[in-house]
Amino acid sequence: MRDWFKNAVVYQVYPKSFQDTDGDGLGDLRGVTQHLDYIRDLGVDVIWLNPVYKNSGVDGGYDISDYREIAPELGTMADFDELLAQAHARGLRIVMDLVVNHTSTEHRWFQESRASRDNDKRSFYVWRAPHEGKEPNGLRSAFSGSAWQKDETTGEYYLHMFAREQADLNWHEPRVREGVYDMMRWWLDKGVDGFRMDVITMIGKPEETIAADGGPGGDVCNGEKTHEYLREMNREVLSRYDIMTVGEAAGTSTEQAIRYASLDGSELNMIFQFEHMEVDAGAHGKWSDEPLDLPRLKAVLARWQTALHGRAWNSLYWDNHDQPRVVSRFGCDADETCRMRSAKMLAACLHMMQGTPYIYQGEELGMTNYPFADISESRDVEAVNAWQELVEERGELTGEQMMRAIRRKGRDNARTPMQWTAGKNAGFTNGEPWMPVNPNHDRINAEAEEGDPGSVLAFYRALIRIRRENPVVIDGDFTLLMPEDARVFAYTRCDGTHTLRVACNFSGETAKLDAEASFHGGRLLIGNYEDAGAADSLRPWECRVELE
């Protein structure tokens, strides 16, 4: 069954922060293997591993220096093989992170490419001559500053859409594509079950956006060549294996997504869109401390649900390694009652939609953002660069304004260690953890939640069972209710046989339901209060799911 991904639930593991087994303060592959039973018991089908390849240590593993070696700090290839075998023995599949828009500048291809202008691998990367003695054009890096870095060896600039140590590959060079495909086959032949493809919509950069013409540059995402290369990748590699693929696709419209993730299987199985993660952006992008605009969030998610239905497949996520903890962002972490209720509400709201749900490590516990006090605590190159640009260079934000934004939306919030126990370092390591452990691990941890039927963990397990037992969750259409309401997110899912009614209160106040959204005596599948409550209202942070 090649469309098994539609019924799957994915658990994302950021190995560096999951479990340390050798006392060096960094999580490792053996740590993932150690907790496979925990992951299996959650009820998921797939583990997405963030990059475990050898890297240069600049961007959390997304700066790969060798695609066929394991990062020494994470273990050995024997450790990976054992993880893969043990996962498969438990019915769990492993999806790898595929990072092929760029490599580390330490990668052997780049070392050869920069050696001289006539090197055999010069065309493997995007090199351009200076324009009037300056950068080729005005393209900006996603991590602040120019996307061009001058290399003194040859006097030309190479493109880096992220950190300067992450040089962009030139996908217009056929030998690059074949080299990538060969590497993908190598991992698939080893037995991995698919790929999550990092910033994959950037690979087919339109030539005019990277021209040395002194212009502003342009949108390097979603070029027509990207679809051409993904169809080629599908023919040469993906279609030959029974695997799952998901592409990271910032700036993608629903119409573009239908091409990337068409049900005809010509490119990818699904994509990650970012539109719902940008509803609280402002004048300084993600570093703006804007409140949630719930009607906007509902409109975005509803449009993706309805536009892709029957044409392409959705992915569903709140948290990941690049996003803060959703309970602190869209929910409430002020006290234990509202933290637990809002964590459950957010989970139900997302998991009852159509698509493949992704759970990021600790999300199933209701883990929260970290109380960062100073920029010196940040390990994230994106946040550090943004601080330098917005606070130190431009003075557009004060230090406290920037720290408030980092506490709310910085990527480091997702990268603090997994909270296993109430003990030292949350049971993550016997050494000094590479990132600070959230001080609330004494009450938010897997050990405490494991035997508690009212825990966030138990709620996630129940949600996954509901998806398994009710085909309407997989196949039903989607209708948004009360679209303009600032507190209630309500919708139905219908498959012609059953109607699933979902209502969620995104506030700490009682919210009324209109006649269409009110409950009609269906079977209560799940809720986050002990009793069903009134048919026409929701209590603070309440969620209710009924089957009619």
Image (tube, rainbow, N blue to C red):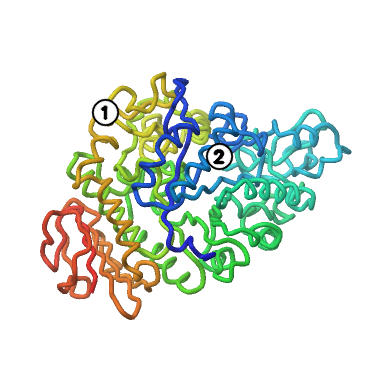
Q: SS for tag 1?
A: loop
* Rendered residue at 39%/51% (across/down): 44
Q: Residue furthest bottom?
A: 496
Amino acid identity at mark 2 = Pro
Residue 81 located left or right of residue 438: right
Q: Amino acid at mark 1?
A: Ala
Q: Position of residue 291 (x, y in %)?
A: 32, 49
The quadrant of the rendering that contains the C terminus is bottom left
Residue bearing mark 1: 422
* Label 2: element kind: loop
Q: Is residue 405 above or below residue 25?
A: below
Residue drawn where x is 71% and y is 59% of the image: 236
Residue at the limit of the structure toward the right, as seen here:
118
Q: Is residue 354 left or right of residue 149?
A: left
Q: Callout 2 environment at 10 Å: few (<14), some (14 to 19), or many (20+)?
A: many
Picture coordinates of residue 259 (x, y %)?
A: 59, 67
Point out the tag, 1 or 2, that comes first from the N-terminus: 2
Q: Is residue 115 above or below residue 501?
A: above
495 vs 3, nearest the viewer: 3
Tell me the number on the disc at residue 51: 2
Please identify the residue farthest to the front as the structure is shown.
89
Percent position (x, y) of residue 251? 54, 56
Q: Quadrant of residue 38?
A: top left
Q: Which mark is residue 323?
A: none
Between 33 and 283, the one lying in front of the other is 33
- Quick check: 69 left or right of 423? right
Residue 317 makes an appearance in the image: yes
Residue at (70%, 53%) from the top-left corner?
Answer: 209
How many residues crowd mark 1 within 10 Å: few (<14), some (14–19), many (20+)? Answer: some
Residue 278 visible in the picture: no
Residue 446: x percent and y percent? 29, 37
